[in-house]
Each structure stands twice: as structure tokens, then as C-alpha cells.
Image (cartoon, rainbow, N blue to C red):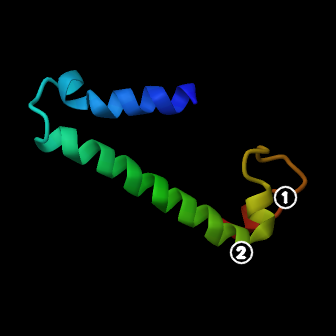
Amino acid sequence: MILLGVTYLAVDNLAAMYGVEAGTGPARVAPIAYLVIFAAGTAWGLILKRTKPTVYEGIGRGTRSATASGLSTIL
């Protein structure tokens, strides 16, 4: 909950942090860009989970994990 609160405050005060007026360029583009990147990453993760479960299981385990052993042949 604390992280959500901090995120809300950061986005709400983004214009002040950038030193621009509310509703202008960077204050509107930055949150939208973060949401687009978040959605693309989530979609890519779901695609990997369905199409290449071995690669998906190796995410976050390092390159020498047993589940990521086939990763070098895929990439």
C-alpha cells in the first residue's frame, strides 16, 4: 500500500518535479509512456508463458539455471 501511495503522489506531483505546468508535455507523456511499457512487458510475459514455457520458467533464475538451459539455442 505504501508503494501505491508513493506512486500516486509522484504521478500527481510530476509537473512540479519537472518544473512545468500541470497538463503540459512531460507531465502527460511520462505516465502514459510508463503504462505503455508496463502493458507491453506484461503482454510479452504472457506470450512467453504460453508459447515458450521453458524460457518463461528461467526468468529471474540466471543463465546457469536448469530451466534456462535451452535459452542459448532459442536466442
Q: Which residue is drawn at 35% across and 28% down?
A: 10
Mark 1 neighbour density, 10 Å: few (under 14) some (14–19) many (20 or more): some
Is label 2 or label 1 in front?
2
Q: What residue type is labelled 2?
A: Arg
Residue found farthest to the right = 66
In this view, the residue farthest toward the bottom is 51
- The quadrant of the image that shows the C terminus is bottom right
Residue at image point 47% right, 28% down: 5
Look at the numbered disc 2 and give the secondary structure of its residue: helix
In the rendered view, tell whether residue 69 sits above or below residue 10.
Answer: below
Marks 2 & 1, CB-CB < 8 Å contact: no
Amino acid beneath label 1: Ser
Q: Is mark 1 on a helix, strand or loop?
A: loop
Q: Name the residue under label 2.
A: 50
Distance of mark 2 from mark 1, alpha carbons? 18 Å
Q: Which residue is at 55% across, 66% downward?
A: 43
- Give x and y (percent) for residue 59: 73, 52
The residue drawn where x is 32% and y is 44% is 31
Which residue in the protein does label 1 denote? 69
N-terminal of the two: label 2 or label 1?
A: 2
Residue 24: x and y in percent read: 10, 41
Q: How many numbered discs sit on the rendered protein?
A: 2
Q: Residue 24 carries which label?
A: none
Query: Where, quadrant-wise, is the N terminus in this rendering?
Result: top right
Would you say 20 lies left or right of 71 here? left
Q: Nearer the viewer, residue 57 or 3?
A: 3
Q: Residues within 10 Å of mark 2 (few under 14, many from 20)?
A: few
Residue 34 location (% of width, % of height)? 38, 47
* Relative image position of residue 57 (x, y in whole percent): 80, 58
Question: Residue 55's image quarter?
Answer: bottom right
Q: Which image quadrant for residue 45?
A: bottom right
Residue 29, compared with residue 68, is above or below; it is above
